[in-house]
Image (cartoon, rainbow, N blue to C red):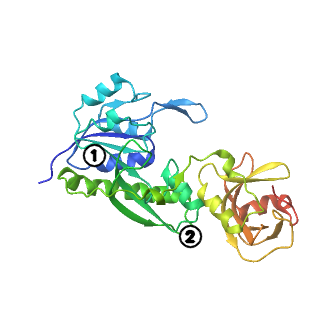
Amino acid sequence: MTKRLKIIFAGTPEFAAASLSAVLKTDHEVVAVYTQPDRPAGRGRKLTPSPVKQLALQHDIEVCQPLTLRDSAAQAQLAAFEADLMIVVAYGLILPQAVLDTPRLGCINVHASLLPRWRGAAPIHRALLAGDTETGITIMQMDAGLDTGDMLSIARCPIHADDTSGLLHDRLAELGAQTLVQALAPLSEGELEAVPQDDSLACYAAKLEKSEGVLDWNRDAIELERQVRGLNPWPVAYTEINGQTLRVWGARAESGDASQTPGTILAHSADSLVVATGKGRLALTVLQLPGGKPTAVSALLNAHKERFSTGTVLG
C-alpha cells in the first residue's frame, strides 16, 4: 500500500498549476502551497494571484508567498508544516540548502527538458530555437546547483515540425503532471533510482529577452522559422515595415535562393508573404500590425495589400 505523503507544493505559472491539479487528485495531502507574490497584470495593472495560488485557494490550502526563503523566519514556517516532500515546479525562488534538507524526502523538481540538456529558465523555448527534435520531462532530486540534481524519472516528448512554444508548453505541462504523479508512489517507498547527470552534456537555457525577437533576414530561413515558433506566444518575433513594427506569429521555411536583398518581399501566395533571407525563403503566414490582432496573411492582404507590395524590404 502506497504511503500517504504530506506535501508542500511550490510553483507559480500555469505549467506548475497542471502538476498541482494532478497531485490534488491523488490520496496524498498538500499541506501548503508556496508561490510568488501577486503581480500586476492586465491593462489595469491590478495585483493578480498566480495560477497556482488561485488553484490552492479553490481547495482551501494554506498559501505562503515569501519574498525569499533565505531568512530564518521563512525557513521555520516551512519546517512547521512537517512535510515529507516538497515538490517544486517553476517556482521562481532559489531554495537554500536549509530548505532542501527540511522535508523528510527532500525536494523534487519537475523540469521541462531531458536533463542535462537545457538547464535553466527557458528550456521549452531554447529547445525549439536550437532545432531539437525531442524534449521531455525530468523529475529531479534537487540540490544546491541549477538543475544539477540526480534524475529520478524521465518522460520523452517529440517536437513536431509545427510546434510553437505555446503548444509544446501545454503538452509538457500535461506530461509533467502525469510523470510526477507516477513517481510519487515509488518515491515514497524508496524505489526510485537516482541517476547522476552527465555534466559534460549540459546546456544552459537562458531566460528569454524581448530583444531576441528581432528577425535578422541575413540568417538562414530555417533558423528564422525556429525563431518565430520558439518565441510564440512570447516575446513574439518581429521586424519592421515602413518604420512600423510587424510582429510575426507564424512562418515556414521554404527552399530556393533569391537574388534580392534579404528581407525583400518576393511574392504573395494564397496564404503567405514570401520573403528573401540569407539562405532560402521565409513564408510569413500570421502577422500583427500595430494596434491590431494576429491575423492570417490571406485576410491581411485583402485589407492592406498595398502595404505589402513585392519589392518592399522588411527590417
Q: In the rendered image of this protein, does residue 268 appear above or below residue 95?
A: below
The kind of secondary structure element at disc 2 is loop
Amino acid type, residue under disc 1 in the picture: Leu
Disc sitting over residue 125 in the figure: none
Which residue position holds label 1? 24
Q: Earlier in the sequence, mark 2 or mark 1?
A: 1
The x and y percentages for residue 80 are 24, 28
Measured in 3D between alpha carbons, the distance from the residue under mark 2 to the one under mark 1, in whole angstroms, is 34 Å
The x and y percentages for residue 102 are 27, 35
Q: In this image, 241 relative to 8: left or right?
A: right
Which residue ends up furthest to the top in the rendered image?
A: 73
Q: In this image, 225 relative to 171: left or right?
A: right
The kind of secondary structure element at disc 1 is helix
| Quarter of the image with the C terminus in it | bottom right
Which residue ends up furthest to the front in the rendered image?
A: 200
The x and y percentages for residue 193 are 26, 58
Q: Nearer the viewer, residue 149 or 255?
A: 149
Q: In the rendered image of this protein, does residue 156 appear above or below residue 44?
A: below
> At x 47% / y 59%, what residue is drawn?
200
The x and y percentages for residue 41 are 55, 35
Q: In this image, 217 relative to 295: left or right?
A: right
| Quarter of the image with the N terminus in it | bottom left
Which residue position holds label 2? 161
> At x 87% / y 69%, what residue is drawn?
260
Q: Mark 1: give few (<14), some (14-19) or many (20+) Cα within 10 Å.
A: some
